[in-house]
């Protein structure tokens, strides 16, 4: 019986190739999106889930309130580790993870020559307890003694293969590695090799060596660094309360004076390992994920799949009048409702299966074309059981829900009506339901169209708005501070470039707009009152203000000096300290925590220091001869065609000054664009989702227009005989669909307005949502709908009425 169903199904699908293709294409796009998003979401939510006893592991993190704002930080003071007593109730073990920066690692090559690995990543200092907490499989060495000497180091298998690709693992132990840091050089001996974790984990280290004696004896509780993190493992049936009580009591005792002086509140909390991958504010540099983004992706997948299912239901129910004779004959020959339903389920399953097969190459094509959306490590992650379960479940759900309503309609066909020639009057196959489905499709598409338009407008606004400084034709390069060239005076390179006429200006200093912060607290005393303000700092040389054309609205430039003694401030700082106007601030003294006084000698107009999600904050510009981190080079804007040659000249001079460091530069406008990388990805994703929504909706609209034109063949022929024009017939066939799109626009507009307002709340400087945005989106949707249905409408309108009436 089933074999017979399959044969009949394949014949029917081939006979109706157009609608079969439309159904398969629509479903395959929805399945492709759903499958790709499932892979991303499954990967992100798999982090640390396979970690044995992961529910008992916590990261100690810092919370603080300063100037009314609460924030979190993943780093801890070095003094916490030595103070923790293993006898604290419920505490089983403590493991520090102190990330280490190395300029390079040098090793003896297979041919006797030294090989160098520049700036290797994922190196940490830790204790043997780390290997009790993280279940590495040991290939060589003993976890109890691998870190028992200060010159020992343990490698993961992947790092061992990187360093010694031609040596068997057994020969790697006792090999020597020379580590070059910013301060010293240390030779370490490999004491063990562990297998890389075979599941997504927040523990990403590849090299491990012992924590230094100084760090183990530290009593410092004031300074925190995001590279110094601490993990604890509690005993079964115990929480972290006793551990946190101990830490916070110590913190209260040792930092009371500092907190009272700076009106600062700080305490420590425990972040569970299960939450760490989604806690971006506590990240020490490891990649994190945003749960809201993942839930948004799930929503997009649901809507796209729903659109594809609606598309199938619309096309299938619209074809039922043409299949009424087939259904009537089957019922006359004794087919039961159950048999008809089973046959239709088999037909739907075949279409869904073909769509699944087409979705496989589409998913691969998407991964290659839009690789920026694919998380790092996903290609190596295979959760086969979840993938099989999801594929089977998705196939079953799509088949069941897509076939449910059309199958029910099939069972309602009355044989008597078919024999009377009334097969087009299938009870229950009401046009109103199909119209509702079309409206739902275009509501979703319209929300995405409006969203894509508003996001694009906000990005355009952020990139075109006056930043408060000039960055046209500016390239920037970091001053080498990680390599062997770090001790070279950067002013030598500046002097080399000043002789080139095709370079308009050059300055040393911080980038005016970036998301890194150099901050401090400053005080101003007036009468008996004392005002305290958190201030950002930027350093530049004597050419810095002129280079970026900051608007100096009061005072003068600062005089460069080895020791900082003059401040240039912005308008936001003037307001924060309560000065009535910029001129009043000139000559006033600001004090740091050590009571050292600094006069304000100039005020510049506010300019943006961070992306548009942040308000302009109080700022001090210091004219300095040190603490400069970037070369700012302005090319001659009148000769852009010569820029490539100029950059080659700059690189040539760079190699003479910094032979050990590559010349890596960026145009500053590109750097500013990169600050909005997340928003740009969101825009691309919404645009992609919008395109898919429109394609799926138009596939259904095209199919329905084709069927409508077919079903109204006789009517169109009669109208033409009675003198109807081609434009009138096209308008007749198109009007119904345009009305549906207009209804969808009315429903979608308030939904899109609410959603986009929520998204724009993250921006301190944002566009205002205007009526014309909705108008453009509506016109676009109507235009797309008209283009979709007009081809079939025109085809029906120009047909010879004699042929249509003779066919009837």
Image: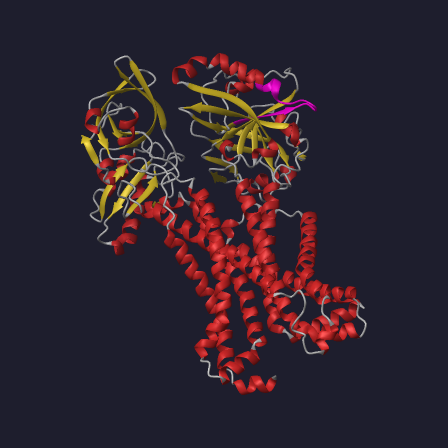
Residue 641 drawn above or below residue 545: below
What color scheme is it? secondary structure
- Horizontal arrangement in the rendering, residue 261 relative to residue 351 (left or right): left
Residue 213 lies left or right of residue 173; in this view the side is left
Instruction: Name the spot of residue 764 as percent of width and height, x first.
Output: 38, 38
Q: How many marks?
A: 0
| Residue 456 part of the magenta-drawn span | no
Q: In which image quadrant can residue 207 be found?
A: top right
Q: Is residue 696 visible?
A: yes
Question: Which image quarter holds the N terminus?
Answer: bottom right
Place of residue 797 in the rendered image (x, y in percent of width and height, measured from the top left): 49, 79
Image quarter in which the C terminus is found: bottom right
In-image side of 27 versus 618 (left or right): right
Residues 261 and 451: in front is 451
Residue beneath the point at 52% across and 16% down:
217
Q: Is residue 116 above or below residue 680?
A: above
In the depicted structure, whether residue 502 falls above or below residue 801: above
Specify whether residue 240 is painted magenta. yes
* Magenta stretch, residue numbers: 229-244
In the image, what residue occupies the spot 24% across and 22% down? 565
The residue lying at 33 percent from left, 47 percent from top is 669
Foreground: 164 or 446?
446
Does 429 sit above or below residue 182? Answer: below
| Res. 488 image quadrant | top left
Give the x, y percent position of residue 220. Answer: 47, 17
Q: Position of residue 378 (x, y in %)?
A: 58, 47
Is residue 32 at all visible to an observer of this figure? no
Q: Nearer the viewer, residue 210 or 205?
A: 205
């Amino acid at each position: 019986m089933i074999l017979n169903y399959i044969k009949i199904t394949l014949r029917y699908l081939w006979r109706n190739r157009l609608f079969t293709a439309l159904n398969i294409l629509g479903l395959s796009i929805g399945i492709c999106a759903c499958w790709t998003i499932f892979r991303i979401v499954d990967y992100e939510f798999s982090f640390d889930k396979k970690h044995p006893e992961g529910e008992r592991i916590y990261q100690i993190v810092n919370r603080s309130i300063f100037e009314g704002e609460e924030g979190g930080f993943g780093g801890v003071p070095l003094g916490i580790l030595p103070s923790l007593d293993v006898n604290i109730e419920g505490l089983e073990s403590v493991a520090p993870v102190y990330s280490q920066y190395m300029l390079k690692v040098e090793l003896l090559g297979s041919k006797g020559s030294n090989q160098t690995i520049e700036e290797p990543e994922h190196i940490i200092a830790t204790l043997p307890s780390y290997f009790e907490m993280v279940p590495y499989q040991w290939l060589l060495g003993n976890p109890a003694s691998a870190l028992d000497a200060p010159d020992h180091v343990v490698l993961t298998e992947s790092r061992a293969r990187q360093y010694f690709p031609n040596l068997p693992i057994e020969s790697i132990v006792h090999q020597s590695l020379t580590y070059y840091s910013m301060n010293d050089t240390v030779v370490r001996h490999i004491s063990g090799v562990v297998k890389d974790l075979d599941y997504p984990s927040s523990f990403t280290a590849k090299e491990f060596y012992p924590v230094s004696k100084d760090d183990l004896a530290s009593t410092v509780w004031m300074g925190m660094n995001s590279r110094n993190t601490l993990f604890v493992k509690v005993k079964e049936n115990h929480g972290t309360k006793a551990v946190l009580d101990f830490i916070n009591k110590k913190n209260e005792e040792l930092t009371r004076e500092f907190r009272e002086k700076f009106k600062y509140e700080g305490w420590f909390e425990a972040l569970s390992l299960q939450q760490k991958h989604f806690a971006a504010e506590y990240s020490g540099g490891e990649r994190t994920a945003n749960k809201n983004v993942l839930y948004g992706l799930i929503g997009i997948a649901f809507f796209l799949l729903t659109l594809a299912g609606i598309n199938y239901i619309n096309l299938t129910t619209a074809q039922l009048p043409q299949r009424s004779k087939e259904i009537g004959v089957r019922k006359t020959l004794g087919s039961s409702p159950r048999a008809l339903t089973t046959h239709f389920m088999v037909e739907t399953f075949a279409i869904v299966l073909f769509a699944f097969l087409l979705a496989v190459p589409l998913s691969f094509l998407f991964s290659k074309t839009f690789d920026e959306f694919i998380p790092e490590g996903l290609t190596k992650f295979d959760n086969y059981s979840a993938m099989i379960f999801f594929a089977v479940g998705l196939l079953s759900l799509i088949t069941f829900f897509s076939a449910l309503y059309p199958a029910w309609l099939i069972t309602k066909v009355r044989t008597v009506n078919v024999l009377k020639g009334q097969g087009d009057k299938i009870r229950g196959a009401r046009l109103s339901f199909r119209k509702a489905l079309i409206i739902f499709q275009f509501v979703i598409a319209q929300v995405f169209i409006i969203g894509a338009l508003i996001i694009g407008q906000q990005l355009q606004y952020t990139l075109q708005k006056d930043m408060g400084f000039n960055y046209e034709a500016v390239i920037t390069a970091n001053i080498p501070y990680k390599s062997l060239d770090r001790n070279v005076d950067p002013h030598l390179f500046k002097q080399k470039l000043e002789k080139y006429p095709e370079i308009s200006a050059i300055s040393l200093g911080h980038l005016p707009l970036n998301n890194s912060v150099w901050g401090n607290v400053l005080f101003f005393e007036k009468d008996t009152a004392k005002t305290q303000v958190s201030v950002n700092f930027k350093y530049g040389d004597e050419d810095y203000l002129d280079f970026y054309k900051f608007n100096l609205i009061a005072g003068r430039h600062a005089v460069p000096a080895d020791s900082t003694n003059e401040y240039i401030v912005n308008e936001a700082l003037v307001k924060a300290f309560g000065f009535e106007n910029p001129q009043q601030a000139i000559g006033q003294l600001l004090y740091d925590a050590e009571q050292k006084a600094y006069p304000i000698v100039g005020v510049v107009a506010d300019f943006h220091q961070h992306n548009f999600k942040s308000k302009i904050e109080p700022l001090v510009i210091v004219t300095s001869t040190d603490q400069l981190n970037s070369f700012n080079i302005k090319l001659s804007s009148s000769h852009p065609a010569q820029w490539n040659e100029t950059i080659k000249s700059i690189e040539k001079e760079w190699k003479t000054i910094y032979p050990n460091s590559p010349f890596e530069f960026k145009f500053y406008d590109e750097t500013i664009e990169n600050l909005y990388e997340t928003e740009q990805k969101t825009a691309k994703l919404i645009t992609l989702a919008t395109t898919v929504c429109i394609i799926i909706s138009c596939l259904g609209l095209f199919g329905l227009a084709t069927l409508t034109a077919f079903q109204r063949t006789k009517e169109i022929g009669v109208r033409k005989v009675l003198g109807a024009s081609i434009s009138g017939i096209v308008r007749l066939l198109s009007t119904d669909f345009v009305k549906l799109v207009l209804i969808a626009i009315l429903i979608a507009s308030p939904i899109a307005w609410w959603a986009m307002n929520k998204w724009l709340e993250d921006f301190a400087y944002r566009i205002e949502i205007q009526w014309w945005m909705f108008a453009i989106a509506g016109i676009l949707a109507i235009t797309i709908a008209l283009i979709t249905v007009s081809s079939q409408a025109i085809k029906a309108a120009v047909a010879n009425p004699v042929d249509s009436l003779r066919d009837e």
